[in-house]
Amino acid sequence: MDENISNINWFPGHMTKALRMMEKEIKIVDAIIYVLDARAPFSCVNPKLNKLIGNKPIIYVLNKCDMANLEITKDWQQYFSKIGANCIMLNSTESGTAKKVENAINLALKDKIEKQKQKGFKAIIRAMVLGVPNSGKSTLINNLCGVSKTITGNKAGVTKGKQWVKIASGIEILDTPGTLWPVFDNNQVAHHLAYIGSIKDEVLDVPSLSLDLIRDLIKIDKQILISRYNIEICAEDEPINVLEKICVARGFLLKKGELDYDRGAFAILNDFKQNRMGKISLEKTSDIKQLLIKNRKPEYENKN
Ligand SMILES: Nc1nc2c(ncn2[C@@H]2O[C@H](COP(=O)(O)OP(=O)(O)O)[C@@H](O)[C@H]2O)c(=O)[nH]1
Ligand SMILES: [Mg+2]
């Protein structure tokens, strides 16, 4: 798997184009809303965006917090506040909750708004929404608007063009297409991004990715798989044995009674994506040291 995933072309031309668009638009932006999937906040930070963001204030959103382990997400929020970063937990699909983001923007830009007021202007605040594909950027913006102005979908790369959206309180928001980065120097990051649906299935090796997911889930808590598939897992089981057990339990069989590994692999990855295994966090704050490798300091480490 490690070999495969580093050879995938997940950086198609439209992402280069998107980065160019973002480079241009970021000049007029006052703040960044950085949408992270709460299940894998570390992996969602794009190391290539550090330079682009510069010193603009960042509001980190731990989105999809309804899909992650609540205690672990709270730890992440604490971690961010300890390093002086703005961070909020959010379920963007719950209507009205994105007000928290609006409040955070107003707070982060308090001085600018005040200065504009003193000059007799009504401040217009512009914020750019960044995040890997499928992290919930468009859903968050829809929530802020109260209507479906942007297109959302549970598939990497649904947002393509440039879309400025005015939200009620004098804040304009730019949705951006999710961007990844050309080289993953950390395989764990690549795996996590694949599990959460940021990398299109079409470019992934689904069978071997499913074995990685099984291995990772057993590490977190083997009960997750035992309960979901009603199987037994013994200490000597390799991921492939677990996949076989899942195929048997689900009746994924081919004509001659052989196991349908492909179908089993697809089911596991899909079950995780659809949150059918419960609230699972792939990354804890205590894993940071393990996940950090040369040249991949998350940008929030550099803040303050
Ligand atoms: N459960 C849950 N689903 C979410 C949340 N935010 C987004 N989604 C779902 O995630 C998928 C991708 O969302 P989208 O906004 O298109 O992601 P984008 O690619 O970052 O713009 C959609 O199916 C959304 O309904 C959230 O906070 N909780
Ligand atoms: Mg989108």
Image (cartoon, rainbow, N blue to C red):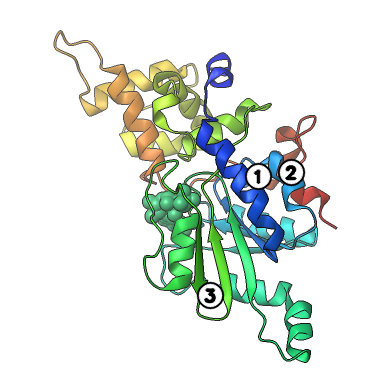
Q: Is residue 7 left or right of residue 76?
A: left
- CB atoms at circles 2 and 1 under 8 Å apart? yes
Label number found at residue 298: 2
Q: What kind of element bears circle 3? A: helix
Residue 67 drawn above or below residue 113: above
Tell me residue 178's x, y (percent). Answer: 53, 45
Amino acid type at image mark 3: Lys
In terms of image quadrants, where is residue 269? Answer: top left
Q: Is residue 233 visible?
A: no
Q: Please name whichever residue, 212 or 179, is drawn nearer the observer in this view of the structure.
A: 179
Label 2 vs 3, first from the N-terminus: 3
Residue 272 drawn above or below residue 145: above
Q: CA distance from mark 3 to mark 1?
A: 23 Å
Amino acid type at image mark 2: Pro
Mark 3, ligand 1, within 8 Å: the answer is: no
In terms of image quadrants, where is residue 62? Answer: bottom right
Residue at the disc numbered 3: 99
Residue at the location (70% across, 87% down)?
Answer: 121
Q: CA distance from mark 2 to mark 1?
A: 6 Å
Q: Please name whichever residue, 68 or 19, is drawn nearer the observer in this view of the structure.
A: 19
Q: Please name whichever residue, 96 or 287, is drawn nearer the observer in this view of the structure.
A: 96
Q: What kind of element bears circle 1? A: loop
Residue at the disc numbered 1: 45
Mark 1, ligand 1, within 8 Å: the answer is: no
